[in-house]
Every structure is written in structure tokens, then in C-alpha cells.
Image (spheres, rainbow, N blue to C red):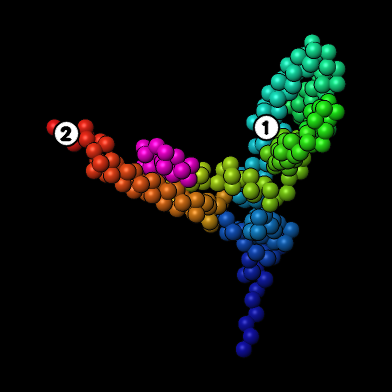
Amino acid sequence: MSVDVSPNALARCATHPDELASATCQRCGAFVCGACTTWLLGSLYCPACATRPEVNYLETLRLQFWGKRDATAWFVMFCALLSLIGAQAAFREGNVPACVSMVAVTAVGVCFFLGMRWARYALLLVPTLFILPGLSEMGPLLVVFAIVPTLFMLQIFLDPRSRLFFRVKVPERALRRLWDIRVNNPLARHAVSLGVLAFFFPLFAPAAVVCGAIALRRVDPHARPPIGRRASSVVGIVLGMGATAMWVMVIARAIESGGLGWLTSP
């Protein structure tokens, strides 16, 4: 026996009542039609929920850093000022090639700080500008020393935070990695740092354990935005407890050997 369902009994889109619903929002549960369906970060939302900062958290992060100067830009500007001082010294010594080279480096650094896109590419040539005046004296050996700064400049060029400063499009994967580093459960990251420091300074050990425990309780992959770093939280706790055990053994051995006899003396 078949049962006919009245069209009036079928679910309707909350935004377009004349349209039948094809799905429900995973945040508020509202019915949505095909035109209102919004896929975001692998989940389906209604148009209203899709615009919420906590739902579209990667877009919120992008807008937060879009066109905003970062620490790298300040570092480049500082290096540009040092290069300007070097250019003045080279000018006084009559070293024209070195002076011209350092003035060019200064110009690139200042323009990078001001957010000019061409300077982002020109920054890759800065190591070359530095080594050109010395090639005649040191030869190919100088090129070897330029490899490390060249790789460093390449890292700045590819850094998502720096790309956002220059208003360059950043892929979702890179944005997710940036969000994970900057925003996602920062207590877990602090727990790991404190755990490492605890092996040198014992007072950091309890802080590492506490931060790791709090961060572990906050982990919720189903939240929006999701809260992760479970592994980092556990690592922070383990490091804190390991450092505590190490310092207990160190102090115990020192007491046994008489190195801390003043602690047990009446």
C-alpha cells in the first residue's frame, strides 16, 4: 500500500517558502533549498550561518591579516636601515660598488615595508645584491654563503602571513595551517614551550602540566571553529612531568652527595 504525502507536508526552505528543502543547516538546523545551500570547509550551512565569523573562521582570519603589516615587514625594515648605514660607510671609504649595492638593498627593504608588491619579488634578489661587490675578491666561495640568506628570503616570499600583508591570494590549505599556528588552542603550544624550558628551569614544569591539561580539556573537533592540538597538549603534560621527575632525581642525588647539605642541616 502506498501513501501519498501532501506537498504541504513536505519541508520548505526557510528563506524561500515556495521551494522544497533539500538539506538542513549543520549549525542551526534550518531547512534550505538548493539555491540557499552553502558548502563551507566541508560542511553545509544556510546563508545566515555561513557568514558568521566562527563558522567561516578561515575567511575571518584572512580579513584579520589582509593588508596588515607583520613582524617580517618590520624585520626587513630594520635590515634596510642597517644596509643604509653600511652604504654610508662604503661611500666614505670610496667603495662605490658596495655603496650602490647597499642603497639598492635599502630601497627594496623600504618598499617591502610599504607593501609594494614588486618588492616582494625583489627581496629574493637581495642576497645577490650583497655578494656582487665581493665576487672579485672572494670568488665562487661567496656564492656558497649566499645560499642560506636566499633560502630565508624564499621562506618570507612563501609565508602566508607575508602574502596576506601584500594582499596576495592564499590557498585554503595555507590559511588552515596559519590558523592552526596562530589561533588554534594556543595553550597547547605554550604547554610544549614551557615543557621544554622546564628542563632548564624547574619552576616551568608545573605551568607546562597545567597549561597542557587545560588545553586538552578544550579540544573539540566538532566545535566551530574546531579546537585541536590534542597531541601538543599531551606532549606539554609529558614534558612537564618528565622535567619534574628529572629535577627530583637531580636534587635527591645532590642531597645524597652532600652538595645540598645546607638544606638538611639544622
Q: Residue furthest bottom?
A: 1
Residue 60 visible from this viewpoint: no
Residue that badge 1 annotates: 72
| Magenta part of the chain | 191-209
Which mark's residue is nearer the viewer, 1 or 2? 2
Assign the magenta stretch its main secondary structure. helix
Q: Nearer the viewer, residue 58 or 29?
A: 58
Residue 228 visible from this viewpoint: yes
Q: Is residue 18 left or right of residue 243?
A: right
Q: Secondary structure at mark 1?
A: helix
Q: Residue at x 63, y 45 (%)?
A: 178
Quarter of image, res 266? top left
Task: Inspect the image, locate mark 1, and give the three-letter code of the amino acid beneath it.
Answer: Thr
Is 73 located above or below residue 40 in the figure? above
In the rendered image, residue 68 lying in the magenta stretch gets the answer: no
Callout 2 crowding tier (Cα within 10 Å): few <14, some 14–19, many ≥20: few
Q: Residue at x 68, y 57 (%)?
A: 39
Q: Residue at x 70, y 50 (%)?
A: 172
Check contact, mark 1 vs mark 2: CB within 8 A.
no
Which disc is residue 265 wearing?
Answer: 2
Q: Secondary structure at mark 2?
A: loop
Is 160 located above or below residue 135 in the figure? below
